[in-house]
């Protein structure tokens, strides 16, 4: 009777097998979970490493001034020297403005020593509608000269042509505002002063 009761408490053989299978199954599930977690971790590590590499590459990109963030100077591409290779374009001179004669005051001074020289030249200019001042005598200079204030070069050249000068460029000259001629009352505020010399350049 006692032996049968003890035998009744012993677990059956099939139960032990089932329990072992359950334990094995749990172990397999745990192993699979651990493996999955390990793969995910490796992928995260790989992505993180790739991100860090990209960030490093971005940091080493050259800035606008030709240096990287770490201070390394980058090589700039060679640029052709436009100043050396471009064809030089000649600078055009500013256009010369020729005024209407009614806007130009001119005085003729007799530096010839003859009589009526300044008056005759004044009449020629008056016929062309120039603002003529009273003709005056001046010290004999020998050489004929036409002086002009700055900005009146073209007008002085035209006056020279009106008076019959063959080469106006050789006669006209810039009037120095501080010179004796410019400050003389004989100028009468004229922009152009004509000195008729005895060299025959200005026909008399």
Image: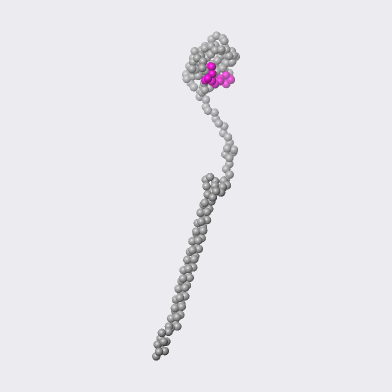
Give yes or no for residue 170 being in the magenta stretch: yes
Identified at 39% across, 90% down, the residue is 1
Q: Residue furthest top?
A: 115
Residue at x-position 51% and y-position 54%: 55
Q: Residue at x 56, y 17 (%)?
A: 145
Q: Which residues are magenta?
A: 167-181
**Which image quadrant: the C terminus?**
top right
Which of 70 and 163 lies nearest the eye of the viewer? 70
Residue farthest toward the bottom in the current orientation of the protein: 1
149 w.r.t. 64: above or below: above
Give the percent coordinates (x, y) of residue 115.
Answer: 55, 9
Asked whether residue 16 is drawn in magenta, I would say no
Q: Is residue 14 above or below residue 195?
A: below
Left/right placement of residue 16 relative to residue 176 reads left
Q: Residue at x 49, y 66 (%)?
A: 38
- Vertical relation: 77 (above or below) 134: below
x then y, percent, for residue 191:
50, 19
Q: Quadrant of residue 23?
A: bottom left
Q: Quadrant of residue 175?
A: top right
Of 79 and 128, nearer the camera is 79
Q: What percent of the width, then of the height, locates residue 13?
A: 45, 83
Q: Is residue 32 above or below residue 188?
A: below
Q: How many marks?
A: 0
Residue 124 visible somewhere in the drawing: no
What x and y, as percent, mark residue 89? 56, 33
Q: Is residue 84 visible?
A: yes
Q: Residue furthest front?
A: 2
């Amino acid at each position: 009777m006692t032996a049968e009761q003890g035998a009744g408490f012993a677990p059956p053989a099939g139960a032990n097998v089932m329990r072992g299978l359950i334990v094995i199954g749990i172990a397999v599930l745990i192993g699979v979970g651990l493996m999955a977690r390990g793969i995910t971790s490796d992928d995260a590590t790989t992505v993180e490493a790739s991100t860090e590499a990209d960030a490093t590459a971005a940091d080493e990109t050259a800035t606008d001034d030709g240096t990287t963030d770490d201070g390394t100077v980058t090589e700039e591409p060679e640029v052709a020297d436009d100043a050396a290779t471009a064809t030089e374009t000649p600078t055009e001179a500013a256009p010369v403005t020729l005024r209407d004669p009614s806007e130009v005051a001119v005085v003729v001074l007799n530096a010839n020593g003859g009589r009526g020289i300044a008056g005759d030249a004044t009449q020629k200019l008056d016929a062309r509608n120039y603002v003529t001042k009273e003709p005056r005598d001046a010290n004999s200079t020998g050489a004929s000269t036409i002086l002009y204030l700055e900005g009146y070069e073209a007008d002085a050249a035209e006056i020279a042509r009106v008076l019959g000068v063959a080469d106006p460029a050789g006669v006209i000259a810039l009037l120095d505002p501080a010179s004796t001629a410019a400050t003389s009352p004989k100028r009468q505020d004229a922009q152009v002063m004509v000195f008729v010399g005895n060299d025959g350049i200005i026909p008399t």
